[in-house]
Image (cartoon, helix red, strand yellow):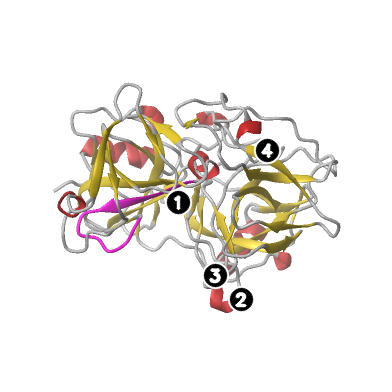
Amino acid sequence: MVVLDLPAGRSGVLPNQYIEAAITAGAIDAGGYTIPQQSVQPASLDLRLGEVAYRIRCSFLPGKATVERRVKDYIIDELDLRREGAVLETKLPYLIPLKERLTLPPGVRAKANPKSSTGRADVFTRVITDESSRFDEVASGYSGNLYLEVVPLSFPVRVREGLSLNQLRLSVGSTVLTDDEIRAFHRDQQPILFSGGFAVHDEGMALSGGLFLSLDLRGDADGRVGYRSRGSAPLLDLSKVGMAEPEAFWEAVRREDGDRIVLDPRSFYLLMSHEAVTIPPELAAEMTAYDPTSGELRTHYAGFFDPGFGYDPASQLRGSTAALEVRAHDVPFVIEHGQRVCKLNFERMLEPPTLLYGRDIGSNYQHQTETLGKHFRHPERVDADSRKVRGHAGREVGDQLDLYAAPGSD
């Protein structure tokens, strides 16, 4: 049995130093492959694609069987991801065995989410494990392989062996802060929510099973609030950073009178949050789903915010905003400035990490002023109110609206 030397009686998300210890102990391994140091993030681990992708005719969960056994019933084609990789077509599901596998000790569980840049390219992903009836959740004590379901939604993409589209977070015990604990942390320890460059008063925080964020639909001096995906876009190579010309994939979206836009259900949108968020070293965060029957918008894909996102120990950075990845459902849907569209759960760290998101790991989105992902050349954006702070993240929303979030790592 794999044993991890964790602090007795403590709960929290495992930071990078404990992830490294888990790799050394064999709780996380990659068979004959080495797990590179750059895969270890402040509170998560990047997962890498293996050598082959299977084009499958439908998504599935294995239930009481292994993934390897169940997938044999659904394989249509096999693609080689070595060397130049392979092209994944839009709206088609693929299953890719990952290099990493887990042998978790009892009491240690894991959760997976897409990386920020994956969500911004509108690539739907989720991890599958053996004998499981849930996506992206890895049960305590799980021992086995990891598989990634991948569905490009807006653009055909090229992927290669070793590319990271998802990340994994390990935790032990009860980790989630209550609304009262979030408010107290913000008030007494470290502000975590900012608006207009100032900390929001704790009584002004919208809390209900997590912290709500709202939309920025005032945009820049030209009224530009984000981007909408183009139809019939060219191939996007996900292994190349800063190379794709955005005009071939995106068109600018500008606000209407009244600081609103109408979403076309055929398109995918990249927008920004109105508030800025700080994740201090003692915390991690995750975008979470919430019930549409309560009248709230509902997020579908979780996204990690690692410790250090929007954080500056010298207090020069007043948080980073979130890049919100939005899609309407079946009919055109209007959204307005300040509309609440997503919710953050905050989790306590087992210990503060020795690495922080941002300068420590060369993060792409710490000071970003655009919603576009790292694969695209970035145009300049001038804010209407002259603020420079912009950041990253994303997620899926509502009865009429889908909002995606993938914030934590790049």
Position in image of residue 65 (x %, y %) = 16, 59
Q: Amino acid at mark 2?
A: Gly
Disc with the residue nearer the chain's start (4 vs 3): 3
Q: CA distance from mark 4 to mark 3?
A: 29 Å
At numbered mark 3, what does the secondary structure look like: helix, strand or loop? Answer: loop
The reply to whether residue 362 is in sight is yes
Mark 2 touching mark 3, by CB under 8 A? no
Residue 349's mark?
1
Q: Does residue 180 sit above or below 237 in this rendering?
A: below
Given this view, does label 3 or label 1 mark the residue nearer the observer? 3
Residue 209's mark?
3
Give the residue number, with chain letter if any, for mark 4.
Answer: 370
Residue at image location 21% in from the left, 63% down from the top: 63
Magenta span: 123-135
Given this view, does label 4 or label 1 mark the residue nearer the observer? 4
Q: Amino acid at mark 1?
A: Met
Position in image of residue 263 (x %, y %) = 67, 57
Q: Amino acid at mark 4?
A: Glu
Q: CA distance from mark 2 to mark 3?
A: 14 Å
Quarter of the rendering containing residue 145: top left
Q: Amino acid at mark 3?
A: Gly
The reply to whether residue 4 is in sight is no
Mark 2 touching mark 1, by CB under 8 A? no
